[in-house]
Amino acid sequence: MHYTGENLRHFALPLGGLGTGTVALAGNGALRQWQLHNIGNHEGHVPDSFFALRLSRVEPPLDEIRLLQGPPSEPTNTPLVTDDVIPPAERRLQDVIQPIGPTQISATYPQAHVDYETDLPIKLSLDVFNPLVPSDAAASSQPVVGFTFTLHNPGDIAVHGKLAGALQNSVGWDGVTPIDGTASSSYGGNTNRVRRTDDWTYLVLENTTLPVDHPGAGQFVLATDAAGLVCAQWTRPEEFVAFLNGPVTPASGASAPGTTWNGGLAVPFDLQPGETTQVRFLIAWHFPNRYVDFNQFGPHTAYGHSRFWLGNAYTRRTPDAVAAADSFIANWSQLHTQTTAWTEAFEQSSLPGEAGARLAALVADVRSPTVFQTADGDVLGFEGVLGASTAMWGGRYGGSCPLNCTHVWNYEQTLSRLFPSLEQNMRDTEYDVMQAPEGYIPHRVRAPLYMKQLWDVVIGGPEEPALDGMLGNVLKTYREVRQGAGLDWLRGRWSNVVRLLDHIHGKWLRDGVLRGIQPSTHDIDLCGVNSFMGTLWLAALRAAEEMALLLGEDGKEYRSLFDTGRTAYDELLFTGEYYRQILDPDETRDFQWGDGCLADQLIGQWWAHQLDLGYLLPEDHVRTALRNVVRHNLRTGFRDFDHPYRVFADGDDTGLLMCTWPHGGRPDIPTRYCDEVWTGSEYQVAAHCLYEGLTDEAMSILQGLWNRYDGTRRNPFNPIECGDHYIRNAAGWSTLEALTGYHHNAITKTITFVPLPIARSANTWQFPFTTNTGWGVATASDDTLTITCHAGTIDVQEIHADGTPYPIDAPIHPGKPLVITTT
């Protein structure tokens, strides 16, 4: 997808692996949002970290030094976002080194190509990436960013010069405290040293004076693939300019207390007319000491002097940043090829319009600082990263609403498809750690996992264990089985599922429906009978029935409860237009919606379509209700709209409101967040529309969402809700599967493709898909279906395409596409 001009204003592509933290490539080519130090901080900036060019020519004489950044754009002041904020240090740097000129960027996560416009007699571009290999979590968890610069001399006169990279030694930094030049209270004792191999020059940035368990202890590497010139230790950009202009004598020794060193490398080049050369750089990092430094929900118990070390899984794979850089360099070409195959699969797909690049960007959610993996391998996730949208209650730095919030993660589908073993780990945590003896599961986990969990205490967001989160636990369990967890895993979890359903049955089920106080993802207690909880309940019953049958158990009880509930919910709630909420006379009207139209009123049916569970309510009623959700809740233009809380759509935006009252009856205190626009709900409703064949309605939601996040006023790679990189947005992966009619069932080893007309051209279509063992691309023409595996293996026994089954004799491996004759 191409970004130019105004679309670059909020562009910030996060680069980093699963659980490693990220640094963002800004729209002008600068590096911003440094979040590598075990804390989320969109305002985190490490000064004096950049790339620069010195270009010279003998005759006619030329000698220029340019910063490889475009001039900054002025902020838009869009509510609750900061992706367009230019750090003051970046502005000061541009006062010393002239920016090269405007940029143009083509990007499909996690790759970007930057073209620099310049008046210099050279053509210059940058390709940047972090490895992403679906089904290979280790390859996708590398703490490194690779930069490849391409320099071309289009003229008829030779030019020469130096391409340089600079990086501040931020070892010891807490990731939050503002840095003034090279001064910070976190600094002192920092040293930079040179390491050379046959082909590469490393600058190793460290601080050996820090205790091994210091939160900021770690290592950085800046490296280039040449016998580079080195300015190991400097403090001001003017010194680096002097280094580019000729030999300098760098400082030596450890930095003084309260200060650090910058370091830099430069690669000389000589380009004759028409010649092209490439220079590679990389930045690698290693920060092993993640602690529980975030406020957790529940009682705040004093635990003496304990700091509760969690560690990071990525630092267990390599002992330091040098080893991480070595490993990446040894596999650079292969990793780049594998990552490019992934991005090209979206770019070259038959998905409509910009859908390919937009859906590829969803993976940034699960590789942002929202999600991490401890040294023990436990996958833990916040709801998002604290920022401008959370300053009013939770501050601007760290993780939002820890940890593994079951009701928000009910929407997430991306991690389960790309890295199902990591998603399975979250289910293990829910059953082994979070589940109470009575069977219920609190909607948050406390870290470390050996801590006392949130049983019989006030939690927060909502206060009591969220019912929708528990119903989602059942659905996610069945999803993980279908994604490859296996029947043995299910057999070991079945008693947990039964205890959970028994608890829900005993506490909430009355006359076939769930009644009473029902804590929810809206951070309040729902009451009465409603289809939000009801469809999740019906879907959970169907999933339980299917799991029972897989284990040879009797699933009749779950089917009976389902049949009773299906009839009761439809008769009680369907108005002929949509599904309402009904309340008993003695139940509060505060924070309810009553006769309103809730966007997520059929969320359980969305789940049911993904899991092949069939219709939970009458098909025609479902389709009618969903059509009316879009009719009533999709709003274009918010200039005259009253925002009582958070503003996620404004001005001329189009967005799906959480709840509306098209026929009046809005309560004095309506359901919380009713006037907000959530990208996760938009993706959920849009995908459901696609499953129902309501293509126009789906695309109107998606286009509104994508227009809001087109780079002009919001970042295409950063969905906002209760924090940045909000995980509810990861519901969007279901949009890809709904467009392509894709289903994968690892139990039966089948995959299915039935693309919607909008995702094909006549009888041809092409798009990526994932399984638990690998990923590939499916390409159909008039008479053939080709399955190309790009990583792992595609281990299936039958492929269904447009209603026709095709048996498969053996797994499909990379380099050996399977071609099926379909006529």
Image (cartoon, helix red, strand yellow):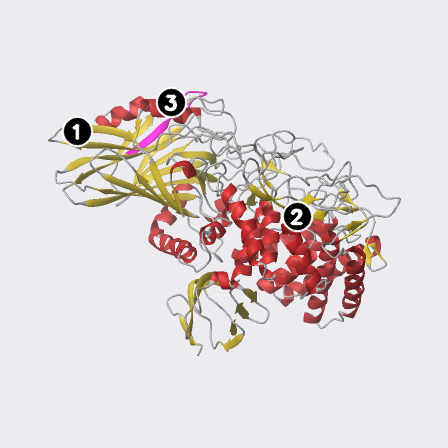
* Disc 3/disc 2 C-alpha distance (Å): 49 Å
Mark on residue 62? Answer: 1
Quadrant position of residue 71 = top left
Q: Is mark 1 on a helix, strand or loop?
A: strand
Quadrant position of residue 479 = bottom right
Q: Give the range drawn in magenta.
A: 250-265
Rendered position, 393 above or below 502: above
Q: Residue 590 in the image: x percent, y percent?
A: 79, 39
Q: Is mark 2 on a helix, strand or loop?
A: helix
Q: In this view, does 22 lie to the left or right of 538?
A: left
Look at discs 2 and 1 and give the one toward the viewer.
2
Marked residue nearer the N-terminal end (3 or 2): 3
Q: Is residue 656 left or right of residue 332?
A: right
For label 2, the residue is: 632
Whether tag 3 and tag 2 are in contact, CB under 8 A, the answer is no
Q: Which amino acid does label 2 sit on?
A: His
For label 3, the residue is: 92
Rendered position, 48 above or below 310: above
* Disc 2/disc 1 C-alpha distance (Å): 63 Å
Residue drawn 81% across and 57% down? Answer: 572
Q: In this view, does 134 lie to the left or right of 331?
A: right
